[in-house]
Image: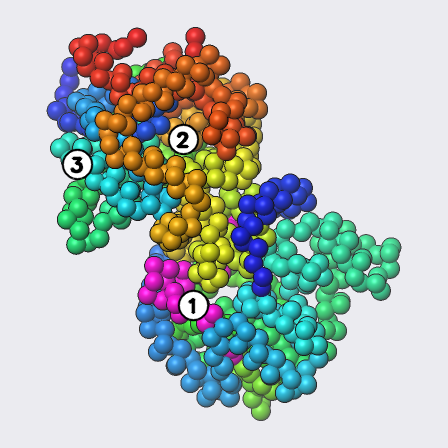
Amino acid sequence: MQSTSPRFRKNAVEALADSELQSALRHVRSNFIEKRAKAVAALPEFDALRDVGRQIKDHTLAHLDLYLEEYEAKVTAAGGHVHWAETGADACQIVLDICRRVNARTVTKGKSMVSEEIGLNAFLEEHAIVPVETDLGEYIIQLRGEHPSHIIAPAVHVTQRQVEADFRRVHTHLDPARNLDEPTTLLGEARAVLRDRYFQADVGITGANFLIAETGTSVIVTNEGNGDLTQILPRVHIVLASLEKVTPTLEDAAQILRLLARSATGQDMSVYTTLSTGPRRAADPDGPDEYHVILLDNGRSAMLGSEYQEMLRCIRCGACMNHCPVYHSIGGHAYGWVYPGPMGAVLTPSLIGVEQAGHLPNASTFCGRCEAVCPMRIPLPKMMRHWREREFERNLTPATTRYGLSLWAFLAKRPALYRLAARIAAGGLGWLGGGKGGFRALPLAGGWTRHRDLPAPEGRTFQDLWKQKQRDGGRMPQ
Amino acid sequence: MTASPADGLRVGLFVTCLVDLFRPSVGFAAVKLLEDAGCSVEVPAAQTCCGQPAFNSGDRADARAIAEGVIRAFEGYDYVVAPSGSCGGMLKKHYVELFDANDPWAGRAEAFSAKVFELVSFLTDVLKVTGVSASHDGTVTYHDSCSGLRELGIKAQPRALLATVKGLELREMKESEVCCGFGGTFCVKYPDISNSIVSRKTADIAATQAETLLAGDLGCLMNMSGKLKREGSPIKARHVAEVLAGMTDTPAIGEKRR
């Protein structure tokens, strides 16, 4: 996917001015947070479970090569095929080769962020293969020609009113009198259209929440059952997943599953949790004839052993963005690439380079709420700070910030000089602004005073007053 | 006078650069609260700032140099107390991250970290202060600043002490734990996003109909009070230490001097 992350600042301003988006974001702020809080409160061992989840992932990442090899052997033994893709382009080509071999015209897809990452839909369309998204949210944004703005609720930025308009525009068979006022009537309409697509599809592509090394099984969770229809009905099932999705055992996956839906949507479990091992066997009533897994690296292995390794624990629940005040303000598209919010602020620079995505780790107040809710205890602010350090080392930090910072640091390292400068600043600003109590505008402080007054200093520094108080035998200076 | 657990304790006050520059009255309120609890308070002159601007901007070398200066200035005290959860978090949680395990400063940073506390949590958690003698006739609402809340676990402590202020009524705002949009340099680097965040915050503050907004961090307070002022709101803003110390005869933050 093409990145607009370098334009983050402009994207953000546009998002703030978009009233439909702002109204849609209210839903994120209320719904997700409340539901998660309730689900977590109802499970006393939630925090202990987070430690278990972290341990499982840390152990897996420390031995990733071994578990991937075991996984490949088990998939092969079950009659499936494993393909290794170093880059997104490699993965796209592997999908295309499979599609061409089986003369596929239509491909149904269950939600997969990795397919967004590698730009699979556009690639398939270029090669005359029609990709059909089957998750309701993904279906909506496909109609709109957009990308997901959230990793579990891809169309969270769209209002119900907009969905109705999109359906009427694209579903030309619709009776204009048909009622599409309710979420359920919209769902019914999408479902009716998608039903045919499931049967037309030659190949079904899904992502994976887990790949289980012990059994060679891929696991997906959905709330709509669309993933099941995507992988069972076509002749060929392709699982497209990144390397770090591998988990040693079924038991391990079960433990992490207890964290996933609670953190994401506040459900105990997603409505569907589907495990697939290999293609259809002779006695099976249904299932694909071919089962392929594409294991995508696309920059992940470079994160191993780096200060960003812990990011590979991420299970894509979206809790960090659901609780992020910056995400609440601008939504996901402003981040400019596949992964928004705090997890994207760490992952995006890792995958497409900090030169492209340098704004993202900076656009955080470091309020720490993302880390507080992360089920895998990923230290997101700490890793954003690592990116800021990389930017600073490589002179990517904006010049004005660097100069301001180095002047300030020069003083902060020299207490006597600092006290003098502080005394002058406090005195000058206090004198200028004291009469009104603050400033509505101030040279060099435009970033502050554009939206807020700047309170004026009281006039003398604490250090100055304290010194006087000591001199005067403890009497408070007037 | 009865003996207090703090009698004889030498406390070094870390003033914080914003308090030093903008609002010395918070520093004096902190001194009063600590002295009332029986501490002997000193203010080392060789302090400037905790180094957060450098640390959070990726300038690790300067952050480390500043940290060394702070540690050196405060090593001799029994405790180091800051009237700020954000600076307290920097001193307590992040200084130790600045030095590798084999760095000669690592041990000094560890020992320093163990002695650092945010003001209100120091009073309640360490000195076991259960009440203050101040009075404040009016309604207040309390904002939980992010670093204090999430790095140092400050939530119940200020509320417990505020409950003992005579005449004071606390009205909780919706989502008091959500960031106000200050975020240090964030608020000037991304002013429009910051504005969106603080606007939601001031709406929640106004909805309580409290007369005064309190918090434990001057940065957040300057942000929220600056926005309230721009919106023409009559709500006053004060550092919680001012109210606990009964030092509210000064103009509130951003109010004109009498």
Whether residue A271 sits left or right of residue B11 in the image: it is: right
Q: Position of residue A92 (x, y in %)?
A: 57, 75
Residue at the location (21% across, 20% down)?
A: B35
Q: Which residue is mark 2?
A: B219
Q: Which residue is mark 3?
A: B72
Q: Nearer the viewer, residue B218 or B240?
A: B218
Magenta stretch in the rendered image: A293-322
Secondary element under disc 2, as helix, strand or loop, is helix
Q: Residues within 10 Å of mark 2 (few under 14, many from 20)?
A: some
Q: Are marks 2 and 1 in contact (CB under 8 Å)?
A: no
Colouring rule applied to residues: rainbow
Judge whether residue A467 is colored magenta: no
For badge 2, the amino acid type reads: Gly
Distance between mark 3 and mark 2 Cα atoms: 25 Å
Whether residue A67 is visible: yes
Q: Nearer the viewer, mark 3 or mark 2?
A: 3
Whether residue A96 sits left or right of residue A347 in the image: it is: right
> What mark, if any, has residue A182 been given in the picture?
none
Secondary element under disc 3, as helix, strand or loop, is helix
Chain at tag 3: B
Q: Which residue is mark 1?
A: A300
For badge 3, the amino acid type reads: Arg
Distance between mark 2 and mark 1 Cα atoms: 38 Å
